[in-house]
Image (tube, rainbow, N blue to C red):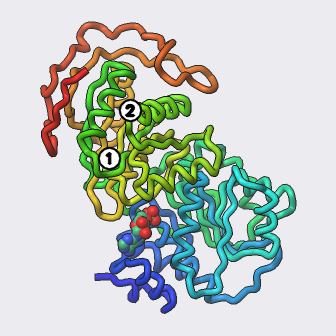
């Protein structure tokens, strides 16, 4: 059996790993740490929750410790790019644990907080810069950050960054880095664009895979509940939340407005709910996450963009109040539960307009999600989305043309996989 000692990490890092409470390396750590220590480029297919931050972070720190380059003003020796502020914060926090007792400095750069303060933080240079691409480019444009001394590049959750103009950002950032450069790319899925990025920015990478793409962690129990519409979903959610009062529940809504409205309704009904989405300030997001992490807020309502990569070990339930429009996001969403070896439930509420999305999700995951309750609604076309903003659900939804009558309703309980872990009273509303 592999141990951290056998992977070749420096004694100080072994102490840090022990202090973090890790006893054995995870599969991605076993596969990634040795080649990264050797200086190889790595392409890792892995979800968060697999221990991938340590998989690239520990050997990266080891290598930075081994050469004692001085930090020059405004420079970084390693750059880690991640799609969201929350993920950047999380990576930086995790790395801070590993660098304790070393001279390695970590600096983070994210949108939503003062540019001047970040420019100031970079003025004396850093060892590891963790950044979102947009804010990094702002600071580069101002001359506050130089990347020519950075000879390590990590692209984390790269598939998420793709939706955010990442290819364009990378085209601006990568040529500014030092050479030769060691590059590590981690992604939970491998869409075609990712292969192109790998071909353009990685050199003869070691390919590592720890879970087949699209396969959710085995410890997540999935289920779906048919819903008649938004109001029915809200009733169902309250019902489910009431059934599991102890854990933390992460609820995904499609729009910022919808997330906010749902959170306010839950609060008005006595639930300790908070929300994070793109309309919240950095301070509000951080407070909401802190309350959720501490368990003072039991329910976090979030949109996809705000929730990526969140690692909160106590999340026992993920509710897909609205199904994601991109099937792969379903995998990321449900991966927010069953962290660090725990079990988790992932429950989706599916309305007639979402049956098409459900089919895509089931196809991507190569599974049939068991039905927990409700009556299968008639399939209807989803409403046309407006170009910007999107409605928050509720009023104004266009009912698409009805599917032919053969899209019959299945009564509750019919069909496959009635694997419920516990009986649920679930016929109300
Ligand atoms: P990540 O995939 O990097 O987001 O890590 C998921 C969680 O697993 C984090 O809470 C880590 O602190 C934890 N973790 C990482 N490596 C190990 C390990 N070898 N043993 C136990 N927990 C770990």
Q: Pointer 2 and pointer 1: residues touching (CB < 8 Å)?
A: no
Q: Is residue 235 above or below residue 87?
A: above
Q: Is residue 388 above or below residue 398?
A: below
Helix, strand or loop for disc 1? strand
The percent position of residue 320, horizontal first and vertical second, equals 37, 37
Task: Report the residue marked by disc 1.
Answer: 317
Q: Residues within 10 Å of mark 2 (few under 14, many from 20)?
A: few
Residue displayed at 56% across by 83% down: 100
The percent position of residue 135, horizontal first and vertical second, equals 73, 53
The percent position of residue 263, horizontal first and vertical second, equals 46, 35
Q: Is 197 left or right of 377, judged from the image as shown? A: right
* Ligand 1 lies in quarter: bottom left
Residue displayed at 33% across by 79% down: 24
Q: Is mark 2 within 8 Å of ligand 1?
A: no
- The Cα atoms of the two marked residues, 2 and 1, are separated by 19 Å
Picture quarter with the C terminus: top left
Number of dots carrying numbers: 2
Q: Which mark is on residue 331?
A: none
Task: Report the residue marked by disc 2.
Answer: 269
Which sits in the foreground, 232 or 26? 232
The quadrant holding residue 30 is bottom left
Q: Is 350 left or right of 45, judged from the image as shown? A: left
The percent position of residue 330, horizontal first and vertical second, equals 40, 41
Q: Is 101 left or right of 169, judged from the image as shown? A: left
Q: Is residue 234 above or below residue 102?
A: above
């Amino acid at each position: 059996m592999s141990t951290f000692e056998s992977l070749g990490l420096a004694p100080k890092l072994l102490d840090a790993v022990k202090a973090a409470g890790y006893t054995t390396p995870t599969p991605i750590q076993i596969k990634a740490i040795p080649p990264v220590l050797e200086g190889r480029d790595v392409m890792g297919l892995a979800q968060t929750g697999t221990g991938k931050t340590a998989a690239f972070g520990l050997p990266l720190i080891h290598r930075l410790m081994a050469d004692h380059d001085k930090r020059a003003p405004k420079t970084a020796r390693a750059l880690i790019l991640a799609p969201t502020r929350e993920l950047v914060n999380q990576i930086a926090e995790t790395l801070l644990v590993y660098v304790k007792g070393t001279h390695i400095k970590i600096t983070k750069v994210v949108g939503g907080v003062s540019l001047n303060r970040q420019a100031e933080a970079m003025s004396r240079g850093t060892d590891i810069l963790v950044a979102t691409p947009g804010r990094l480019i702002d600071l580069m444009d101002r001359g506050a950050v130089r990347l020519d001394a950075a000879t390590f590049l990590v692209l984390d959750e790269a598939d998420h960054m793709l939706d955010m103009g990442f290819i364009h950002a990378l085209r601006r950032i990568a040529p500014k880095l030092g050479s030769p450069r060691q590059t590590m790319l981690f992604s939970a899925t491998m869409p075609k664009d990712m292969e192109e990025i790998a071909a353009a920015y990685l050199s003869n990478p070691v390919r590592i895979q720890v879970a087949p793409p699209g396969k959710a962690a085995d410890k997540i129990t999935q289920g779906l509940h048919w819903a008649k519409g938004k109001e029915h979903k809200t009733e169902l959610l309250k019902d489910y939340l009431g059934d599991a009062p102890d854990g933390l529940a992460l609820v995904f809504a499609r729009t910022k407005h919808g997330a906010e409205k749902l959170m306010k309704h839950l609060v008005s009904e006595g639930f300790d709910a908070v929300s994070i989405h793109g309309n919240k300030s950095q301070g509000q997001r951080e407070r909401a996450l802190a309350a959720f992490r501490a368990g003072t807020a039991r329910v976090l309502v979030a949109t996809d963009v705000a929730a990526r990569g969140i690692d909160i070990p106590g999340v026992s339930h993920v509710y897909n109040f609205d199904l994601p429009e991109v099937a792969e996001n379903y995998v990321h969403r449900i991966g927010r539960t069953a962290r660090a070896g725990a079990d988790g439930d992932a429950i989706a509420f599916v309305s007639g307009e979402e049956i098409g999305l459900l089919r895509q999700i089931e196809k991507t995951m190569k599974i049939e999600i068991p039905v927990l309750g409700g009556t299968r609604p008639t399939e209807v076309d989803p409403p046309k989305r407006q170009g910007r903003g999107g409605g928050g659900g509720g009023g104004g939804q266009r009912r698409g043309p009805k599917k032919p009558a053969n899209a019959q309703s299945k009564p509750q309980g019919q069909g496959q996989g009635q694997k419920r872990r516990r009986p649920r009273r679930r016929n109300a509303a």
